[in-house]
Image: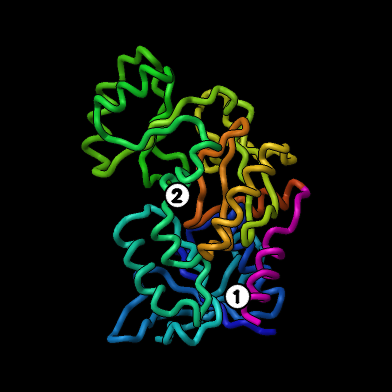
Amino acid sequence: MTLNIAVQMDPIARINHKGDSTFAMLLEAQKRGHTLSYYTPDKLSLRGNEVVASVQKLTVRDVEGDYFALGEPTRVNMESFDVVLLRQDPPFDMAYITSTHLLERIHPKTLVVNDPASVRNAPEKIFVMGFADLMPPTLISRDMEEINAFRKEYGAVVMKPLHGHGGAAVFRVLPQDMNFGSLYDMFAVTFKEQWVIQRFLPEVKHGDKRIILVDGVFAGAVNRVPAEDDLRSNMVRGGAAKETELSPREREICERVGPALRERGLLFVGIDVIDGHLTEINVTSPTGIRAIAKLGGPDVAAKFWDVVEAKRK
């Protein structure tokens, strides 16, 4: 089977191909003989009932400084593709939401991964609240009284934007923190929606585990250990990738979450677990494939394409 694949992603010239999960997916697809086309979200249009984009043929290679080549731009009806990878990074803003509305018009005739309606309706820090019993105590609010009551009950908390990504604007707030008033004011001006306030888990110093599920089934994992002087374990923020195995508790979490992912057409998902507590379900552009492979873990990209090819049959 040869698939005609388009990838909607951020500018490919700006990625760190050595650690980029989308790039790993593209390498595996090309290895299997599938054809690749590339476009950025701003090239997507809706004309009447037709979803079109200006795309470029893409070839990839794992070579430093010379990892991709693009053909000439061509206007294409998006229904001509077998698969579209929805892989641009957040922010999960109105531009992102609009692209899901457009791609929803071609899915499932063209398989969009992940399902654009489910991506839109399952923001990572809200969707996860459907599994509150697996999580640390968590509040989604921007109300000062509600936040202070939560802090009084749980002590040290983590405060972060609801639609943030990559560890940006994540803060630990201590029980008697003189910076809290200023931090609240900064959040109130910067983020118009509610925020996430979550009981701080001290065991994060031992790692924040990224677990990849493909079609709701465990496919690989990496433990991300923060630097000594940083709360955040994200590898783009200096977190170190460590080999890991799943604990019984983590397997239980995968088994609980997996059916909900399959039901929503969320084929490629990264969940985050700290000390046996589920903290996020990442559905927009989860990462971790290349880190898992470098540590001798499973070939997640191969598992992903096995599932996609089976669905296209």
- Is residue 309 a member of the stretch shown in magenta? yes
How far apart in space, not on screen, are marks 1 and 2 (Cα)? 35 Å
Q: Residue at x 62, y 79 (%)?
A: 312
* Residue 134 lies in the magenta-colored region: no
Highlighted magenta segment, given as a residue range: 296-313
Amino acid at circle 1: Thr
**Vertical placement of 264 versus 164: above or below?**
below
Q: Nearer the viewer, residue 241 or 161?
A: 161
Q: Nearer the viewer, residue 12 or 98?
A: 98
Q: Residues within 10 Å of mark 2 (few under 14, many from 20)?
A: some
Q: Which residue is mark 2?
A: 127
- x and y percent of residue 198 in the render? 43, 30
Residue projecting furthest to the right? 296
- Specify the label residue 59 is tagged with: 1
Quarter assignment of residue 34: bottom right
Earlier residue among tags 1 and 2: 1
Would you identify the image quadrant in which residue 151 lies? Answer: top left
- At horizontal 78% and vertical 49% (from top left) the residue drawn is 296
Q: Amino acid at mark 2?
A: Phe
Note whether residue 243 is visible.
no
Is label 2 in a helix, a strand or a loop?
A: helix
Q: Position of residue 212 (x, y in %)?
A: 63, 52
Q: Position of residue 300 (x, y in %)?
A: 69, 58
